[in-house]
Amino acid sequence: MARIGTTLTGLGFLFHLAATVLRGIAAERVPWANLYEFAMTGTLLIMFVYLLVNTRMDLRFLGTFITGLVILLMGTAALSFYVGVVPLMDPLKSVWLVIHVFVASLGTAFFALAGSLSVLQLMQSRRERRLAEQAEKPGPRFLGTLPGSDKLEGMAFRFAIVGFIFWTFTLIAGSVWAQDAWGRYWGFDVKETWTFIVWVLYAGYIHARATRGWRGNPSAWLAIVGFTAVIFNFTIVNVFFKGLHAYSGLS
């Protein structure tokens, strides 16, 4: 069943890739200039990173969480954020659109893996605690086929570090682009501020776990809060907050 699920996921990825490429061809530019296109490309990269990592380590147990997240995000984008192909706004006509947004999407993909692993870590930790207490029903049976909570935590931490590196570059590239577009590196625009908040959350998570001994459930909750902030940044902030980064494409 795991092989069948992974095969279907790979097939879905190919159709997803084709749709994204065709959107770019229709627009005659990179397909991530508005919120709908970013959701399309961002979810594509989440699936790409998940499938790529599976060639090095067995993460098939994470498939339900990752595909479920992607389906939710794609469904929300199709129902609420869809816009037709339109020309680029002037501030977006820059090579930094390609670099900045693509790297941010890659960082988001690794944060998604870390967040999903952290959810499983919390569930597995509760199961292990109930087993130690010799509870009659320690938890869902599928958790018995998963790695232990310590191993899940270690994998989440490694993915979060990779995502943090990409996110750091996102901040730097965004500042350089802001200087080109608006004549200043930083202006406390709401999007800039929330991107920095996400960076601080993950910096705190990495620092707390590496040097302060925040292991177990506190570590997992920090990773989950960080990924929640990422999703908030790319949905609520883009739709409901006004600022220089108001490129959702929605009226």
Image (tube, helix red, strand yellow):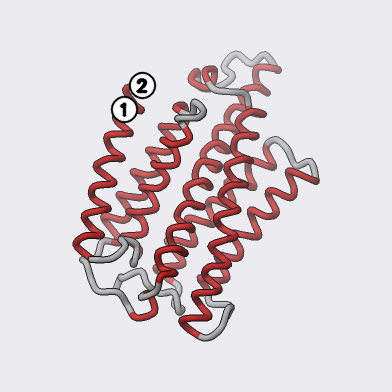
Residue 142, image x and y in percent?
48, 20
Secondary structure of the residue carrying numbered label 2: helix
Residue 120, image x and y in percent?
55, 32
User: Where's the N terminus, which quadrant?
Assistant: top left
- Please state if 113 lies on the left or on the right of 97 as rendered: right
Residue 111, image x and y in percent?
53, 47
What's the CA distance linking mark 1 and mark 2? Answer: 6 Å
**Amino acid type assigned to the residue bearing label 1 in the image:** Thr
User: Where's the C terminus, which quadrant?
Assistant: bottom left
Query: Crowdedness of circle 2 by 10 Å Cα count: few (<14), some, many (20+)?
Result: few
- Please state if 234 lies on the left or on the right of 28 as rendered: right
Which residue does the numbered mark 2 point to in the structure image? 3
Tag 1 and tag 2, C-beta contact below 8 Å: yes
Question: In the drawing, what numbered circle is on residue 167?
Answer: none
- Please state if 24 lies on the left or on the right of 228 as rendered: left
Question: In the drawing, what numbered circle is on residue 7?
Answer: 1
Q: Residue at x 58, y 67 (%)?
A: 172
Q: Residue at x 31, y 70 (%)?
A: 249
Q: Nearer the viewer, residue 141 or 66?
A: 66
